[in-house]
Amino acid sequence: MNVLGKILALGMLSVIAACTNNDPSALGGGFGNGANGAISPGSPSDPRSPAYFQQTVGDRVLFSVDQSTLTPQAQTVLQGQADWLLANTDFVATIEGHADEQGTREYNLGLGAKRANAAREYLISRGVAGNRLTTVSYGKERPIEICSTEECYSKNRRAVTVLTGSTLG
Amino acid sequence: MMRFLTSLLLGLTLLAAPVSAQNGPLRLELDQGIIEPLPFAVPNFVPDGPAATQYANDLSRVIADDLIGTGLFREISSDAFISRVSSFEAPLQFADWKAINAEALVTGAVNVSGNKLTVRFRVWDVFSDKELGNGLQFTGTTEGWRRMAHKVADQVYSRITGEGAYFDSRVAFVSESGPKNQRLKRLAIMDYDGANVQYLTDSAAIVLAPRFSPTGDRLLYTSYASGSPRIYVLDVDRVRQTELNTQGGTMSFSPRFSPDGRSIVYSLIQGGNTDLWKMDLASGQSVRLTNTPAIETAPSYSPDGTRIVFESDRSGTPQLYIMPANGGEATRISFGQGRYGTPVWSPRGDLVAFTKQNKGRFHIGVMRVDGSEERLLTSSFLDEGPTWSPNGRVIMFTRETQGASGRATLYSVDISGRNLRPVRTPDGGSDPSWGPLQN
């Protein structure tokens, strides 16, 4: 298959994924694939697949109000992410930092950056090469849940590790 | 669309009129608190011919709407008029206007010749039986008729209040559509009253917080076009954008021009930490202004350019600080309960407008530059991002409603806290930036 054919095939896969997934949290971190290029999720039963990383390892960690410190649960998830990334060295990742809507737009951009960086630093401390991990803050621009109660806010205060590509191309 | 702005005002001419005496007793003193709006009448401007009829009606309507919108004036309906104004030159029957208690009267005439529009007007102090200031004439294009109406209204406002006005101004903002988790955002610009909306970007990338240059020729804004938040500058007339090379990090946001328009101050994220930097636009050189592990953002210059007010959580919660424009020791100015953000220095230099979050509510407020005399002007589920009218009398901001159907709308409020009103935009609106009075 030539290069163009490969790109088209990847594009079709991601279109199919988008159409069959009504729950935005089920794939791709809910947001972030757009700018960085969608990748094929593969089968969740394949431990080497992005779908497995997302659903079984866990692609996100949650934070307390205004906090960017990692809870023990978050550290457990990130340890799993680090193990997976060390075993699947083809992949690079972008860590998205998000905030809930309580707070100004500007402050939340800063807060999202701290959360993404906290996750990145933890992965690096567990041996993942820093040049495989970029960060981006979305502040409060892309909530995953849209109600205005703590139940939703707690899910929006997150750092999501989005696999953005394979180093093998 | 934008080109007419430069060619609009072909002429600004004083009508032959006696040299005005001192302003009469007709005067609103805004600092004394306006409780009762001043009654005024704008009889339909007199058209010089059939081609001018619609323009005369529309101009009169926009002039009245500008004045009503301030909350300082109350229009007397034409149903109550005793005499008609059928000639711009004919003597006024002051008694007829006194009888319906029209304290101020605005008369005018409109001429249309091809696409050239001329409007003449006078402002009358009815109870002094005399003109307030001099008659004036504006000439422009028919396409720019709304601007000419705003210019007339600016004159009326200034003559009666003795202060600068703000009707002939524009607002840059973010037009919003779609649900909160998939919101589409486009940069847009409009007249201050929501008319003539023009879109400057498409919705392919998230855009945030446009900020006008001091002369209104450029906009700074933040876009995710590259995948990360980065600062861009846009030439308003050409609708051409350029990414600014903010050094040393991949994310930058919250830019604002210096009063001379030659440099910007902004937030740069490095290693997860947000600090303030300043960039000289000509050289592209950036220098660091703050260096702490705290989130430092939302910088805004004093009108004289010597100081910067900004937001920092270095004390543990977001608060407001002022530092010298080249960095250095910062002084905290906010000490009330709650969290403070997005400070914006007033054009007069005396006040700082801000967003305050306290006990689950958001407020727009103002305080003096030393932090004293804090006053909250609004209260809702989520108010944020104030911007000042050119004369420092009105604040526009974003109000977002709660829940799954939450929507962002632009609002304005007088700095007295009165006259809270939505600004009508085609879709939702956020992050307003109120530009200067146009020339």
Image (cartoon, coloured by chain):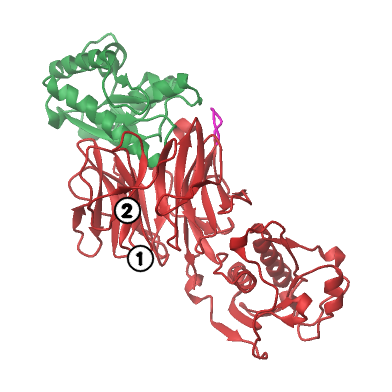
Residue B304: x %, y % from top left = 35, 65
Residue A137: x %, y % from top left = 31, 35
Residue B195: x %, y % from top left = 59, 58
- The residue sitting at the top extreme is A45
Specify the colour of chain A. Answer: green
Q: Is residue B5 above or below residue A117?
A: below
Q: Is residue B237 left or right of residue B280?
A: right
Is disc 2 surrounded by few (<14), some (14 to 19) or many (20+) residues within 10 Å? many
Specify the colour of chain B. Answer: red
Nearer the viewer's eye, disc 2 or disc 1?
1
Residue topped by disc 2? B232
The disc placed on residue B378 is: none
* Magenta residues (range): B401-406
Residue B215: x %, y % from top left = 41, 67
Q: Chain of mark 1?
A: B
Residue topped by disc 1? B304
